[in-house]
Amino acid sequence: MPVVQGLGWTFDTVANTYEKLRPGYTKELYDTLFSYLPLCEGSKAVEVGIGGGQATKPVLDTGCSVMAVEPGKNFCQLCLKKFAAYPSFSVLNGKFEEIELAQDTYDLVYSASAFHWVPEEAGYKKVFDILKKGGAFARFANHPFKDKSRPGMHEALQEVYAVYMPGSLVPTEYTEEAAARRAQIAAKYGFVDIEHHLFRRTRDFTAAQYVKLLGTYSDHIAIEEKTRGKFFEEIEQAINRMGGMITIYDTMDLQLARKPE
């Protein structure tokens, strides 16, 4: 889904639904991350924008401590409960670019589908400052794409979008070139050993499940409630007319970069 600046606040209003319906990330992605930067007990990480904690458990399971920085109060409370069994987990409520964090302290700073909400220059400079020498920044995200397996599904949904969200961007499939360009942003701020990787998967939804998922996207949440209800009803009807199931094709991109020794 496209990023709509100024709507970052919307996610916290649907924190529980977001936690249940937004996907995590593949084992292959974490294997690549932990090969680039092995973690263990004694390692320290900052997670920027934890949301519903979709990317947190694999890092905690290495023995690494995780301090999450999250602007949404509801997400903070949700994740404190979700990871209560991990004494090495903590949360700071606030925006990453505004929270004071110790310099030259952390082995890993990572952000999953959240760093695009942080102003680029402030965000990258802060990550660089708080990392130890040799520490790593991992930025990853999920990019959903249209159903390729059902001819006509995308067109049917676009007809509904044309009524309720005219002018909205038609999603394009995330590419190797886009991942490479995004990875090289880190070079502007002094990072080295830059890598990028892509991982793919599919997810299947019933019509009802899919409209619940749409209700976790910022630009959809921002639609007036009554209008949003009609919009989602027509989306659900369109999917049901075409068999009642929809498949989303995901591309996950992982960018890795290191603070020089």
Image (cartoon, rainbow, N blue to C red):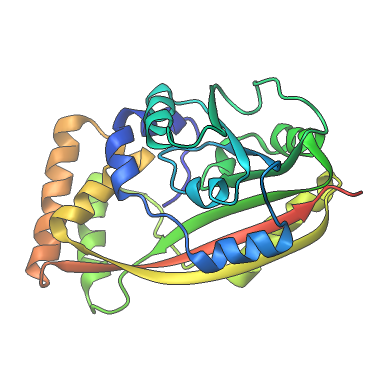
Percent coordinates x, y for residue 227 in the rendering = 17, 36
Q: Is residue 154 above or below residue 211?
A: below
Judged left or right of residue 239, residue 55 is right
Look at the image and tell me whether residue 77 can be seen.
Answer: yes
Judged left or right of residue 115, residue 173 is left
Look at the image and tell me whether residue 222 can be seen.
Answer: no
Q: Residue at x 61, y 60 (%)?
A: 254
Nearest to the observer: residue 174 or residue 67: 67
Judged left or right of residue 106, residue 104 is right
Q: Residue at x 57, y 34 (%)?
A: 88
Q: Residue at x 11, y 48 (%)?
A: 233
Nearest to the observer: residue 234 or residue 203: 203
Percent coordinates x, y for residue 125 in the rendering = 78, 35
Nearest to the observer: residue 139 or residue 131: 131
Q: Is residue 106 above or below residue 206?
A: above
Furthest-right residue in view? Answer: 261
Q: Residue at x 75, y 57 (%)?
A: 184
Identify the image quadrant of residue 7: top left
